[in-house]
Amino acid sequence: MSDEETDNQEETAATAATDEGAAIDEGSETSVLPPAEVRAVLEALIFASEQPITPREIGQVLGGVPKEMWQEALGDLQADYARDGRGLQLVEVASGWQITTRPEYNDWVRELLDPQRPTRLSIQALETLAVIAYKQPVTQPEVIELRGVKSGGVLKTLLEKRLIRITGRKEVVGRPMLYGTTREFLLHFGLKDLSELPKIEEFAEVLGEEVDVEGLKRAIEAPRPVEIPLSDEEGEQLSLDPGAGDDAAADGTDAGDTARESTED
C-alpha cells in the first residue's frame, strides 16, 4: 500500500471519529421520540392525568425530549383542539393543562353523568364565593358585613364542595377563621390562577343572571369592616403560650381536612 493510500485511510478514520464525537455531543439535544409521537404521548398524558398536568410533570415524564420540542407539540395540540366542531378543548387551568368538554355542551354531559343531582349553587352561595374570591383572605364576619346576609351554612356548603378552604386565623379579637379559594375553584371556573379573575361584572355573568351584580360590586369595592386588633397583652400571652396558637391552628386544619375529605355534591 502506498503512502498516499495510507494517508487517505487515516484521514477517513479521523473524519469518522470526529463525526461520531459530534453525534454524541448532540445527543443531549436530540429527542428519543419523533415529533408526531411526542404530540401523541402528550395527548395521552394530559388525558390520563386526574388533575391538570403541570409543565414540571411533563418534563419529568418526557425527560428524553427537549423542552422546546414538547412545548411546540403542546401548542400544536391546543390549536388542533381549538378547531370548530370539537366537543373537547385543551385548556391551561390551575397552573396545568387539561382536556375538558366544551362549556356549551355541559348540560348534555351533566345529563349523562348524573341527571338527578342538582349541580348549581344557590344565589347566596355564589355571591358569598365571589366575595371570598375577590377579598381573600376574608373572615365570616367580614363576609356577613360586606354582603349583609348570614353565611354560616353557605360557608359549610362551599367547604364541602372544596371551592374554599380555611387559610388560618386573623390576629384580631376572637381570632376568626380566614377563608380563601382553592385549586378546585380555579378548575371550576377555568382560571389559570387568581390573576385571571375578571372584573366582577364579567364574573357575575359567569355565576348567573340572578346574581346581584351591583350589590356584589359595592361589597367588593367597600373597605373591610373595622375590627379590634389583639392587645399587646393578648399578643404577648399568645407568644408565651404556644399551645393556644397551636390549638387555633389545629382547629383550622381539622376543618380544612374535613372539607377536603367530603364528597362533592
Image (tube, rainbow, N blue to C red):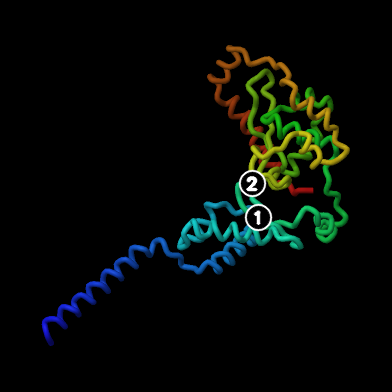
Q: Label 2, on which residue?
A: 94
Residue 33, compared with residue 224, is above or below; it is: below
Mark 1: which secondary structure?
A: strand
Q: Position of residue 89 (x, y in %)?
A: 70, 57
Q: Nearer the viewer, residue 132 or 160?
A: 132
**Residue 178 visible in the snapshot:** no
Residue, x 61% and y 31% (percent of image)?
Answer: 249
Q: Amino acid at mark 2?
A: Ala
| Inter-mark Cα distance, 1 to 2 | 9 Å
- Counting every numbered tag in the picture gives 2
Q: Where is mark 1, residue-wise? A: 98
Q: Does residue 141 lie above or below 133 as drawn?
A: above
Q: Is residue 126 above or below residue 69?
A: above
Quadrant, the N terminus: bottom left
Image quarter of residue 76: bottom right
> Horizontal placement of 69 versus 207: left or right?
left
